[in-house]
């Protein structure tokens, strides 16, 4: 039986928006390819397909069973008289899921794409040195454990979503388009992978210099940004309908807010790089664009267009400085800028909802309850719920994803051999280059 | 030092959870949640510093 909460028009619109989400995956994959080296381009695309495939299968096998959906079966513990819903108890392999237009079936479809998107994020940070089989293992762990656990807490009626019902903190932790479960979880996994892999050879020299290793194809990278916009509009709109009880008629505001946040963020990044370096930097502008999309995800349904513009411009500024800070000060070699764009941009987006959110309609969040309207996110304590979400991401998800990947790395080393890195991932792992007709690089390992 | 950083992250999170469960007053709860986040920030700084590349390994 279709869910009575979802009107037929909203269900059709939701399905349409969900089918736009793979464009975001295509966009991220193209960006990662463009920002990496030419000798690893084919490998990066192959890794993207592998990550999507592994994530989809893991979601089908156990991911969705652990994540669940609002109002579905779940395990809860009682703490000081309140119920803390911590993990879903759906059957594995999508059993008992009715594919008849129900909200749960739409959520299952949405989750397969979302977990794939989260799995693509760490690929950008491990570019040029992360082995294909290790990517499969790490993606499996992300899609089967880390992502569903946190996504249940946010989107499955878990304890973070219950903070409003249980403790009067606004509407509970809110995230419309997955800034937390997709972007920040993916970004923190990217940080863990970067720490475990270490920097590319030649990135940091003993004299303290960190030469830039530019991406090999700006066209791919910038085209990826355009594709990502289409995907993000779908992501934010479908999330608003499925997880906050929004109607299809609200999609216009969401679309406007999404593009305004991305535009403001990209313009901020272009302006800052122009002022600092004399010319706008294409890769940082691209990172700014996606950073704006990421920051828009949490709040797009609950802010005005002017506020989305402010959120986006702050995201562009934060992401631009964060890329440089991570690379030069913290020695995090992240070729795709995944940590800055997805983790830092996402954290800002989550907090921005607490500061800017205005709730003009009742919000669906935990246990099928529509929490009543309120004037402002700050007055209602929404900021505290969002801050607890940020604390959970940093205090629980980061140690968990680091520990899991570290453990996997002990059994199957993530990093390719020195010879493989010198040769390029395409030749070493796939046996053929992405651009066989062209000599596209010099060997920077040879002394000149 | 690496382990210490991650333990501090976890400790900060437990402080946040304890504040939600144990403190009934909204003001006290908010103060302890902010304290928990501050502990996490310290843990994050420690984690980043412990992953700086030693000079002899730079190449």
Image: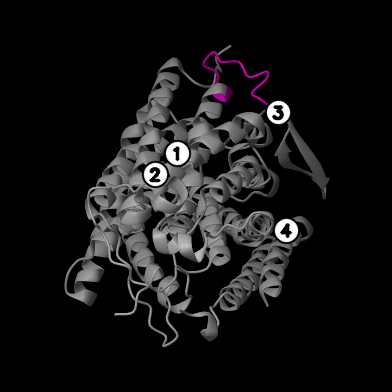
- How many angstroms separate mark 4 from mark 2 (CA)? 41 Å
The residue labelled by disc 4 is: B17
Residue A445 vertical position relative to residue A411 in the rendered view, above or below: below
Q: Are marks 1 and 4 on the same chain?
A: no
- How many angstroms separate mark 1 from mark 3 (CA)? 27 Å
- Outermost residue, left direction? A278
- Specify whether residue A396 is in view: yes
Q: x and y percent of residue A320 in the render? A: 34, 67
- Label 2 crowd (10 A; few <14 / some 14-19 / many >=20): some
- How many angstroms separate mark 4 from mark 3 (CA)? 26 Å
Q: x and y percent of residue A71 in the render? A: 66, 29
Instruction: Tell whether position A96 is magenta.
Output: yes
- Specify whether residue A312 is in view: no
Mark 1 or 3: the one toward you: 1
Q: Are marks 4 and 3 on the same chain?
A: no
What range is drawn magenta here? A90-104
Q: Which of the labelled discs sits on residue A49, or is there none?
A: 1
- N-terminal label among 1 and 3: 1
Residue A137 vertical position relative to residue A406 in the rendered view, above or below: above
Q: Helix or strand or loop: what does disc 3 sit on?
A: loop
Q: Which residue is at a point 35% across and 63% down the rendered structure image? A: A314
The residue labelled by disc 3 is: A90
- Label 4 crowd (10 A; few <14 / some 14-19 / many >=20): some
Q: Helix or strand or loop: what does disc 1 sit on?
A: helix
């Amino acid at each position: 039986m279709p869910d009575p909460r979802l009107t037929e028009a909203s269900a059709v619109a939701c399905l349409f928006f969900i089918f736009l989400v793979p464009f975001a995956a295509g966009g991220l994959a193209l960006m990662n390819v463009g920002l990496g080296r030419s000798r690893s381009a084919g490998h990066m695309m192959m890794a993207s397909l592998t990550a999507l495939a592994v994530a989809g299968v893991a979601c089908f096998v156990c991911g969705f069973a652990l994540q669940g959906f609002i109002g579905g079966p779940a395990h809860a513990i009682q703490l000081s008289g309140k119920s803390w819903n911590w993990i879903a108890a759906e059957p594995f392999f999508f059993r008992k899921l009715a594919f008849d237009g129900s909200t749960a079936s739409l959520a299952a479809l949405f989750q397969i794409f979302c977990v794939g998107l989260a799995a693509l994020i760490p690929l950008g940070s491990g570019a040029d040195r992360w082995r294909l089989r290790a990517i499969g293992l790490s993606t499996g762990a992300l899609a089967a454990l880390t992502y569903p656990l946190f996504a249940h807490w946010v989107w499955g009626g878990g304890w973070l979503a219950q903070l409003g019902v249980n403790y009067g903190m606004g509407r509970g932790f809110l995230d419309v388009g997955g800034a937390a479960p997709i972007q920040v979880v993916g970004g923190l996994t990217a940080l863990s992978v970067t720490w475990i892999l270490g920097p590319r050879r030649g990135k940091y020299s003993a004299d303290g210099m960190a030469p830039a290793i530019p991406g090999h194809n700006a066209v791919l990278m910038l085209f990826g940004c355009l594709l990502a916009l289409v995907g993000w509009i779908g992501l934010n709109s479908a999330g608003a309908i499925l997880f906050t009880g929004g109607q299809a008629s609200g999609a216009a505001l969401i679309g406007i807010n999404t593009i305004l946040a991305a535009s403001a963020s990209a313009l901020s990044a272009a302006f800052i790089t122009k002022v600092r370096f004399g010319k706008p930097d294409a890769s940082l502008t691209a990172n700014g664009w996606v950073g704006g999309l990421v920051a828009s995800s949490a709040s797009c349904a609950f802010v005005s267009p002017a506020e989305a513009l402010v959120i986006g411009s702050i995201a562009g500024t934060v992401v631009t400085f964060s890329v440089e800070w991570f690379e030069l000060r913290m020695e995090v070699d992240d070729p795709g800028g995944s940590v800055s764009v997805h983790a830092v941009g996402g954290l800002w987006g989550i907090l921005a909802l607490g500061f800017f959110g205005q709730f003009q309609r009742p919000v669906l969040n935990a246990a099928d309850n529509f929490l009543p309207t309120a004037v402002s996110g700050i007055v209602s304590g929404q900021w505290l719920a969002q801050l607890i979400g940020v604390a959970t991401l940093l205090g629980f998800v980061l140690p968990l994803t680091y520990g899991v990947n570290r453990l996997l790395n002990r059994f199957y080393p993530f990093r390719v051999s020195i010879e493989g890195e010198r040769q390029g991932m395409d030749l070493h792992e796939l046996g053929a280059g992405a651009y066989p007709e062209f000599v596209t690089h010099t060997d920077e390992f040879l002394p000149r | 030092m690496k382990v210490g950083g991650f333990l501090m992250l976890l400790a900060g999170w437990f402080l946040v959870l304890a504040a939600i469960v144990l403190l009934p007053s909204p003001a006290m709860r908010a103060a302890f949640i902010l304290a928990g986040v501050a502990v996490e920030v310290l843990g994050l700084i420690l984690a980043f510093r412990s992953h700086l590349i030693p000079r002899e390994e730079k190449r």
